Image (cartoon, helix red, strand yellow):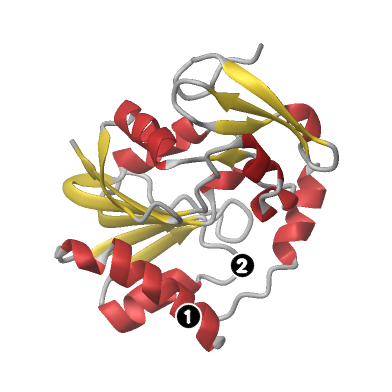
């Protein structure tokens, strides 16, 4: 039996005949794909390169602005500096935050912006959108992001929350993307955040979640 990567709890196995084997933690609700079903690094990058996301696409911009307004602006806080972790081939979110919200942004992406500009810095706002589901060891990255936050700053994150039962999970479109290896619910995020000294201040029970330092 695989132990949970977040809380160390027991997991149960869920197998999808096409999309692989997953381990579902009975304690914190985190789900992770079995490493034997990971795609290769080259296959993963090929999938990322097929994403066609652009600042010139009004629907894509609206998609991010909804997230910004609901998960960030609605907190009522002011932000001067921000950092987007996993900015992708086109840093649309960071561009919007700078252009439309006046936040001075820096970015990092393992594949597309690999310079570690964040070293030794702290930011008012940290964002991470459609990234954490691709990460094998999410606690390691949460610790990193928490370390980039000031005492009064926020971490705003976007990823689809997994269904709460096995039948719906096996029919869930999100697992069709083979690069999605770490899957969360609000409960799983609460465990993850707590281990990094963060607490949840908002989530919409679907896709957005925001944390502050404890």
- Numbered disc total: 2
Q: Give coordinates of residue 10: x percent, y percent.
A: 55, 14
Q: Residue at x 39, y 41 (%)?
A: 186
**Image coordinates for residue 92, horizontal then vertical, percent:** 49, 74
Q: Nearer the viewer, mark 1 or mark 2?
A: 1
Percent position (x, y) of residue 176?
74, 51
The picture quadrant where one finds residue 36 is top right
Q: Within 10 angstroms of label 2, few (less than 14), some, or many (20 or more) residues?
A: some
Circles 1, 2 touching at the beta carbon (< 8 Å): no
Q: Residue at x 62, y 32 (%)?
A: 32
Pick the residue in front: 98 or 170. 170
Q: The C terminus appears in which quarter of the rendering?
A: top left
- In the picture of the structure, the residue carrying the numbered disc 1 is 61
Residue with the mark numbered 2: 89
In this picture, is 28 found above or below 161? above
Q: Which of the pair 17/181 is nearer the observer?
A: 17
Q: Residues within 10 Å of mark 1 (few under 14, many from 20)?
A: some
Spatial separation of the CA atoms under disc 1 and disc 2? 15 Å
Q: Secondary structure at mark 1?
A: helix
- Depth order, front residue of 171/118: 171
Q: Earlier in the sequence, mark 1 or mark 2?
A: 1
180 versus 28 height, above or below: below
Direction from residue 86 to residue 105 in the image, left or right: left
């Amino acid at each position: 039996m695989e132990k949970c990567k977040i809380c160390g709890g027991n997991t149960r196995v869920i197998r999808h005949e096409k999309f692989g084997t997953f381990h579902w933690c009975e304690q914190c609700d985190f789900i992770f794909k079995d490493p034997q079903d990971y795609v290769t690094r080259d296959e993963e990058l090929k999938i990322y390169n097929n994403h066609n996301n652009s600042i010139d696409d009004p629907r894509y911009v609206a998609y991010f602005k909804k997230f910004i307004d609901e998960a960030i602006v609605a907190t009522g806080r002011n932000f001067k500096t921000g950092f987007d972790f996993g900015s992708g081939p086109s840093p649309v979110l960071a561009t919007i935050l700078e252009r439309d919200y006046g936040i001075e942004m820096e970015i990092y992406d393992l594949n597309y912006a690999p310079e570690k500009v964040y070293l030794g810095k702290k930011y008012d706002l940290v964002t991470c959108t459609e990234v954490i589901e691709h990460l094998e060891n999410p606690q390691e990255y949460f610790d990193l992001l928490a370390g980039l936050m000031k005492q009064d700053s926020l971490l705003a994150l976007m990823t689809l929350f997994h269904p709460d039962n096995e039948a719906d999970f096996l029919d869930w479109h999100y697992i069709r993307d083979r690069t999605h290896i770490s899957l969360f619910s609000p409960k799983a995020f609460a465990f993850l955040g707590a281990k990094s000294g963060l607490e949840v201040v908002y989530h919409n029970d679907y896709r957005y979640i925001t944390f502050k330092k404890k």
